[in-house]
Image: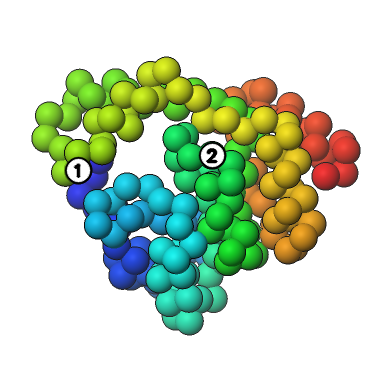
Amino acid sequence: MTPYLPVTPDEIARESIAAWEAGAAIVHLHARDPRDGRPTPDPSVFRQFVPAIMDATDAIINITTGGSSVMTLEERLAGPLALKPEMCSLNMGSMNFGIYPMLEKYRNWKYQWEPELLEKSRSGIFRNTFADIEYILKNLGEAHGTKFEFECYDVGHLYTLAHFLERGS
């Protein structure tokens, strides 16, 4: 909801490179449909900016496995599985992403999909079950050597992380 959000592949590459030049060691990346700014899991969009960032920096590339609460697990992993980055974010559980109160704050929308996505957060959840986490750890971590930025949004997520550490996952 900010005019400063990079949307196109060129904008994402430019802002990531600028962050690295300012001292960032890791760039956490999401892809956006360049036509309308909608979150997209499309590997072809990631391929339009990740190589440019890699060519211009030595930043650690961290691709989201979250993407959007309306994406399936398979959709959320499409980019990371195709690009095999050295790091990915990994939410340590399911959660409510209740961003619908922003509907009251904004009246002018840049894109038509924005209010619909916000409203969906009223009744939807971001799903990341134990089985989902196991799948991600196996198919990105074990299969490709990807390391993880474990995202913990509540105390229960810390217990989930401890569970996987105790199992040696």
- Closer to the camera in the image, 83 or 63: 83
What is the residue that sits farthest to the top in this orientation? 123
The residue tagged 2 is 72
Mark 1 or mark 2, which is nearer the start of the sequence? 2
Q: Quadrant of the N terminus?
A: top left
Asked if one can make out residue 151 in the rendered structure from this viewpoint, the answer is no
Query: Where's residue 152, x and y in %?
Result: 61, 34
Kindly identify the residue that appears in the image at 26 percent across and 26 percent down: 102
SS of the residue under disc 1: loop
Q: Nearer the viewer, mark 2 or mark 1?
A: 2
Q: Which image quadrant is residue 134 in?
A: top right
Q: Is residue 98 left or right of residue 75?
A: left
As drawn, the label of residue 80 is none
Q: Is residue 56 left or right of residue 100?
A: right
Query: Where's residue 16, x and y in %?
Result: 40, 65
Q: Is residue 168 left or right of residue 68?
A: right
Identity, as a three-letter code, of the amino acid under mark 1: Tyr
SS of the residue under disc 2: loop
Kindly identify the residue that appears in the image at 28 percent across and 30 percent down: 116
The residue tagged 1 is 111
Query: Where's residue 78, x and y in %?
Result: 55, 55
Identity, as a three-letter code, of the amino acid under mark 2: Thr
Q: Residues within 10 Å of mark 1 (few under 14, many from 20)?
A: few
- Closer to the camera in the image, 21 or 35: 35
Q: Is residue 153 above or below residue 135?
A: above
